[in-house]
Amino acid sequence: MILAAIFTPKAIGAANTSNDKVAYLFTYFTGNDPAQEQICYAISDDGYNFEPLNGGHPVISSDTIALTQCVRDPHILRCEDGKTFYMVITDMKSSLGWASNRGMVLMKSTDLINWQHSTVNFPTKYPKQWGNVTRVWAPETIYDHQAKRYMVFYSLRTDAPGSFDRIYYSYVNDDFTDLIGEPRFLFDNGTSTIDGDIVYNPSDQLYHLFYKSEDGRGIFQATSKTLTAPNGTPDGSQWTKLSAHVDQTQEAVEGVGVCQSIDGKSWIVMYDCYANGHYQFCKSNDLKTFSFVQNTATSGRFTPRHGTIIPITQAEKERLIAHYGNHRNPILPDFHADPEILYSNKTKRYYIYSTNCGQPGWSGYTFNAFSSADLINWTDEGIVLDVKSDQVKWACGSAWAPAAIEVKQRDGSYRYYLYFSADAGKRKEIGVAVSDSPTGPFVDAGAPIVSESPTGHGQQIDVDVFFDPKSKKHYLYWGNGYMAGAELNADLMSIKPSTITVMTPEGGTLDTWAYREAPYVIYRKGRYYFMWSVDDTGSPNYHVCYGTSKSPLGKIEVAANPTILKQVPELGIYGTAHNSVIQIPGTDEWRIVYHRINKNFVSPSKGPGTHREVCIDRLTFDKKGNILPVTPTLDGPEPLSMVR
């Protein structure tokens, strides 16, 4: 369900003639899991393309404001004074059932960051008439100029036979902490009528009530010269119903929201295509005809449900970004892990190959490639290899931890080698696939190139490939429970058995540098840097350490201060490890790409480590060549244009 900014005649005029409104704030929730029934923020300069704040994570914790500890359908309003904001929200945990909520949350703020709150429980407040209420859905607020009070309207339904959802309203006290008097009937369409949204249109001097109707299944509207019946009788007779659909789709929709654009020339019309996992945005010049603009994505950091937009000032925008950050981490949509980053001299773009994550037991079986020109904005290039298909005949699943390299051929063309691990029956083995393009398709070599552990224990996973600029040779590294390295043959599709070397860093504990998995190698100023992950991927102690060597096959000398990346729980950053590194071409600027555990999946009951996301931050060295500890961020590094 989605609602939008509600403006009175005065507020609309002020918002659209003032030059200080420069952007839009979107308040929304993201799904039906309790972890998703939280208030989120996103901002936009045009009202159609939004960037989530706070990394797409909630900005207000529902368990601190709601009786059910979950909320949905946030509606935000700028008040008549221009500096106070009201928000009303459905107090509901959907996992208890769609007829389980009994009230709403009222909130008040003067900075969009700090909110006062109170709750209204209808069976307690109205035991005689609404003691058996089963739904108090989608409240919104509007200023009634005739009554000179703020009105909250919402849909109600009881468990009485024949009851259906109808829109009611109440006025609010001066503190915006409670409703005044009994709920009064406002409107229904003769059948279940929910998700009401009201805007005033100065052009036709009418209030437009948009709503979802189960009769005809779509978004409809009604118009009126007044908010309530002229004679004060709560019979809804003031509204004239219009028959035309507002929505521009055949999909199931709900939660319409309408907001006049900042320039006052058009209206932003949006609604939740809830059954198909995306939002749809439309445009109208007159609130009579509506044209499709675009859909949001069905996955990623910005997958809003039933929300509201309001115009905001430059100062408000800057305050929100300063507090929540216009975050770029994670940089990839959905759940991905074990990122391998590559710069292509052929395309002049960066590529990340990753483990597809989020499945129980880390059981994903495909690899995707993502490309970027600036290390911030990433394009999903699709699946480049499927280990359960006929593409990889020796494997049967669990595609993990890819590594990739670009090699220039004698004729000037480029070839790309993708190394990976996968299930091969009862054990993990390492294979390689080849392509003429960084986005594939990759063709498997037909058989694994590493099948046995040189130590007799541990898994053959977490492969890394490295080109040594001194010897002009290529090397492969791998191992869980041990670290091994070997020189690759000239075909890059097999290793030289005589060069296999066990390189596990000596000593250390789980709290220090004890090697577990994910070796990664870079070369800088005559020194080979070896990085690896410590402890288990689901452990709070999961972190990255490093050492150096004079040779690509060791011996590794552990650094005096070996830890270079670890989690920051106070920022909601957990399980930071399994990294790759990229040098910005032509500079001594470096970036570390790594995965972390999504903060909503860190508890043992949520399968910690199976819901990971890919992030990027700066990697720096001191004057002696030591790697300085990396501070994992929510923002990520500055754009490349600022580096050069």
Image (spheres, grey):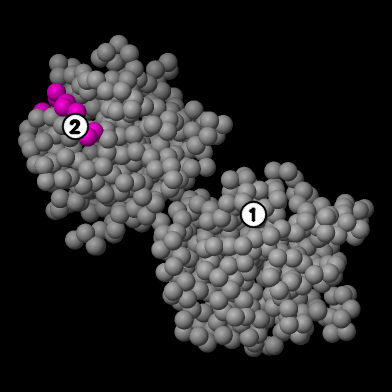
Where is residue 637 drawn, in percent x and y?
30, 54
* Residue 313 against residue 123 in the figure, above or below: below
Q: Nearer the viewer, residue 355 or 389?
A: 355
Residue at 77%, 48% (x, y): give it.
100
Q: Which mark is residue 65?
A: 1
Residue 559, which numbered label? 2
Name which residue lies at 64% across and 78% down: 7
Classify residue 527 by image quadrant.
Answer: top left
Q: Does 552 lie within the magenta span? A: yes
Q: Disc 1 to disc 2, how far (Cα)? A: 47 Å
Residue 269 in sight: no
Question: Mark 2: which amino acid?
Answer: Ala
> Taking the image as drawn, is residue 88 in sight?
yes
Region of the chain picked out in magenta, as a range? 551-562
Q: Are marks 1 and 2 in contact (CB under 8 Å)?
A: no
Query: What's the residue at 34%, 41% (across, down)?
Result: 594
| Quadrant for the C terminus in the image | bottom left
* Position of residue 336 measured from the top left corner of the image (x, y, whole percent): 42, 41
Look at the numbered disc 2 and give the secondary structure of its residue: strand
Residue 57 rendering spot, x and y as whole percentages: 50, 52
| Image quadrant where residue 10 sits | bottom right
- The mark tally for this picture is 2
- Left or right, 194 with reference to 56: right
- SS category of the residue bearing label 1: loop
Question: Does the magenta-highlighted stretch encompass residue 276?
Answer: no
